[in-house]
Image (cartoon, helix red, strand yellow):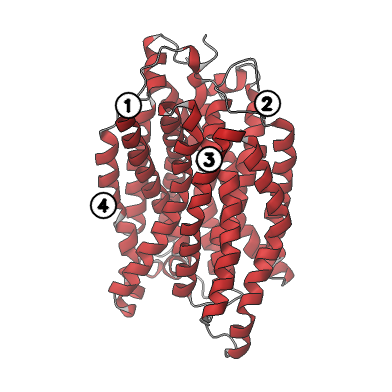
Amino acid sequence: MASSSTELTQVEPTAKEIRLVIAASSAGTVFEWYDFFIYGTLASIIGEAFVPSDNELVRQMVVWAGFAVGFGFRPLGAILFGYLGDKLGRKYTFLVTVTLMGIATAGVGMVPSVETIGMAAPAIIIFLRVLQGLALGGEYGGAAIYVSEHSPPTKRGFYTGFIQASVVGGFILSLAVVLGCKLLIPADVWQDWGWRVPFLLSLALLAVSLWMRVKLSESPVYKAMKAEGQIAANPFVESFTYPGNKRRIFVALFGVAVGLTVIWYTATFSSLTFLTGPMRMEEGVAQVIVAGSALVGLVFFIGSGALSDRIGRKAPIVWGYVATLVLLFPCFWALGWAMEPALAAAEAGAKVVPDTLAVVKIVAALTVLNALSGFTYGPVAALLSEMFPARIRYSSMSIPYHFGTGWFGGVVPLIGTWVVAKTGDIYAGLWYPWAMVLLALVVAVWGLPGGKPRDFSDDHN
């Protein structure tokens, strides 16, 4: 058993091949996360179409519970597709995941409303969310590892930073498509059936993604392992029996995945819910502001990955955690402060549009949140690839990542909504992500490898 991927005889990809790898992997990741996030972007209208209740809070809770279901099944997808990725190869495994995701997302756009088929409607939606969760459980690990295994060690954080940024890109694309459709489709048609168009567009995105990814060759690390007979017999079992791997999985779960994911979902979906809910901002305006701020924040994801190539993966992540503990509540207080004048001038219950100065303040606060997310998220694909042996890398990386993001991050909007409803304090929902970041900081300081980046070997954690 070879303990390090550096012992394998690999054929180094050319610069042109690396550019294609990054472009195709990033585009596919954007499209797949678009498919997953479009549900959350259209949460309010999904509640109207598929939840049999006139109570807005009940609808919101049920929709976010469905959102969480997709996350809940991501670990199972990580186990299934991680196994296939380590046994059969990186390329063909994430071709399967992107196909499954595209079909499941288009399916949401085809399900009749609850008024037409009754309780079968929400049941079908939940089933499709399960399929989406399974697909996403295999997608991220495949794309991240594929790019990482093509990258030279000195640029691995920079190159994989594009995969990290692609997650945000999927969120931005989901908002952009919804806004574009609203502009082109009359309001009454949008409310009736036009909202289904963003889901159906996933079939076009699927076609583009498959076209790009079919052109790719298999990972050089995987090809070398296969040629030298080093493929793991049972990657799932070996992930928990390989020396030191249980500790690495624990650190990856609680020191990395839990922290980065609660920050990111708080910066995106929680901020959007906060602005359109307690702050009563007009939905389209809020979507433009949140999407624009996330777009600006992309630079921090790529920049943090590049920075980690020079100073190590641990430092930017720990800095991001510490800064989040200090700035999380003040950023949301700033959002509330910026909206106060518009709320005071508006009629009770009416939707409001902030003035230019308020928008500047809101964008500034959201940009800080996205910067915090970028620092903790940017180096992660490179870090997790380097933490685990190549023969079980897909499984060992995907399992903790998707348990952390699925079971701790995916519930951020649901828990936040529930806590605010129970306490009446619009900021009380932030205590959950704050506590999770504190936990992640403690584990990261204790368990993440420090120093300059280096490939996995048995002589370091």
Looking at the picture, does residue 286 appear above or below residue 100? Answer: below
Quarter of image, res 124: bottom left
Query: Label 4 neighbourhood size at 10 Å, few (<14), some (14-19), many (20+)?
Result: few
Quarter of image, res 28: top left
Mark 3 or 4: the one toward you: 3
Question: Given contact means CB atoms under 8 Å apart, are the residues at marks 3 and 1 in contact?
Answer: no
**Disc 3 versus disc 2: distance between alpha carbons?**
24 Å
Left or right: residue 440 versus residue 289 is right
Residue receiving disc 3? 305
The numbered disc on residue 14 is: 1
Looking at the picture, does residue 338 appear above or below residue 89? Answer: below
Q: Where is residue 456 in the image (x, y as percent from the top left)?
A: 56, 21
Query: Label 1 neighbourhood size at 10 Å, few (<14), some (14-19), many (20+)?
Result: few
Residue receiving disc 4? 204
The numbered disc on residue 247 is: 2
* Helix, strand or loop status at disc 3: helix
